[in-house]
Amino acid sequence: MKPQKNNFLLSVLIGGLFFWLPATPVYPESEIFVELSKETRSEVNIAVPSFVPTGDGADENFAKKSHDVLENDLRLFELFVPLDSDVYSELAKSEASTGQVNYAAWSQLGAQWLIKGEYEKSLSGNKYKFVFRLFDVVNEQFLVGKRYQGKKTFMRKIMHRFADEVMEQLTGKRGVAETRLAFLSRSRQGKEMYAVDFDGANVQKLTNEQSVILSPDWSPDGRFIVYTSYKEHNPDLILLDPDGRRRRRPLLRLPGINSAPAWSPDGSRISLVLSKDSNSEIYVLNRWRKLTRLTRHFNIDTSPTWSPDGKKIAFTSDRSGTGRPQIYIMDATKGDRSGVMRITFESRYNDNATWSPDGDKIAFTSMVKGNFQIKIYNVETRETTSVTSGPGSKEEPTWSPDGQFIAYRMSRGRQSAIHIKRVGGKKSRQLTFLPDGGMSPTWSPYPKK
């Protein structure tokens, strides 16, 4: 049940253009792997000197913009602390022409990791080559080197791509700088969908529905976003290309509610809520548009979310008899006929369940002292912990594909925006700043390498 999506009481290619060559190793990659457990991780001091031009072309302004994007990505991961360039500027200059690394000198300045970047501008000025090398200063090891090339307009993607490589070296999991989030914002006629990069830049309007739209969900392969649209005066299920260029014909159009769509992990099915049987029930729609009913209860069932193995579905229902929504888990094939397990008990209102990519946690919205807050249920221990607190309502959580961040809607009065918080972290970051607010975020999967 999604307070803004369902009213509970109502029951590497972009647009076909090649933009860079696959990253290629600069040197044979080291066997060093840095392990940093979630419980004991600490921030890493990293130095990212200005990129050095090679060849005949130099573009200092462009190089600085590129450098700043990469450094900011690392900062937003909240596991890296980029050192102030004033600390190491002289050392970086002295090494720029030699290609050497004075590990002892860098260590003395407080650097634990070091990134050295080079760039080359094409004669036309339209394309750039970037070479990055990552060093572990503490252990005096070369970790990884990558080479990219592409059009100038795809600079941000290249920086995001290498930032994600650096994150993978640290944690064993690819970073999420290259991912995007889709979300809704109010309009005069209803709502429209937008997309934004992980760092809050590159905001793009995806729809022109001029109507009410609800419940966007990004497909596991990244090819589509499914949502409910009232454009044709019926809550139709629509597929949209993630760049907004193609809006496909309704995937499903039935009288009554057609809402809360959620992709199965393999992308072959969509769970959704229909009211064609005079009540809000959960169904599964397969690729041949065949419907299978999963719930059969006289109370309202809604807001399905799949476990990563595709075997279970968590959902919201007021079937407890209190008239207050709670979260349950059922078999994804047999539905509630094989029984359900209730997982929320601490609040009179729990909704918006979303399963983590690793399958060990379920994030959800919970009413706490008059405000909505985000909580996490541990599937193994069956314990619940709070992710957010304080003033304002936080709702509609969505997981990053690495399972390290949660994005959600934060609202105070009529003001709303999408915020991001690292799981286990202390601070949150506002991602969107549209004057008409932000709601119903859905996180993209990893783009293909």
Image (cartoon, rainbow, N blue to C red):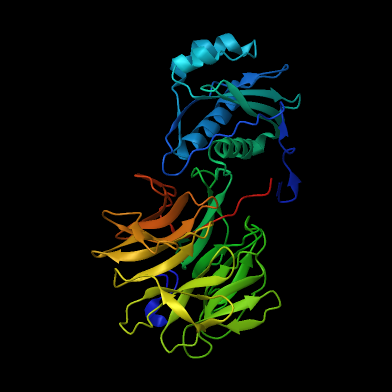
Reply above or below: 140 against 311: above
Q: Position of residue 212 (x, y in %)?
A: 49, 70
Taking the image as shown, residue 33 lies to the left or right of residue 433, namely: right
Q: Nearer the viewer, residue 381 or 378?
A: 381
Image quadrant in which the C terminus is located: top right
Image quadrant in which the N terminus is located: bottom left
Q: Nearer the viewer, residue 181 or 25?
A: 25
Q: Nearer the viewer, residue 132 or 244?
A: 132
Q: Is residue 254 visible?
A: yes
Q: Nearer the viewer, residue 162 or 383?
A: 383
Reply above or below: 121 against 289: above
Q: Position of residue 428 (x, y in %)?
A: 37, 46
Q: How many marks?
A: 0
Reply above or below: 58 against 65: above
Q: Position of residue 197 (x, y in %)?
A: 54, 46
Q: Position of residue 85 (x, y in %)?
A: 47, 19
Taking the image as shown, residue 43 lies to the left or right of residue 285, namely: left
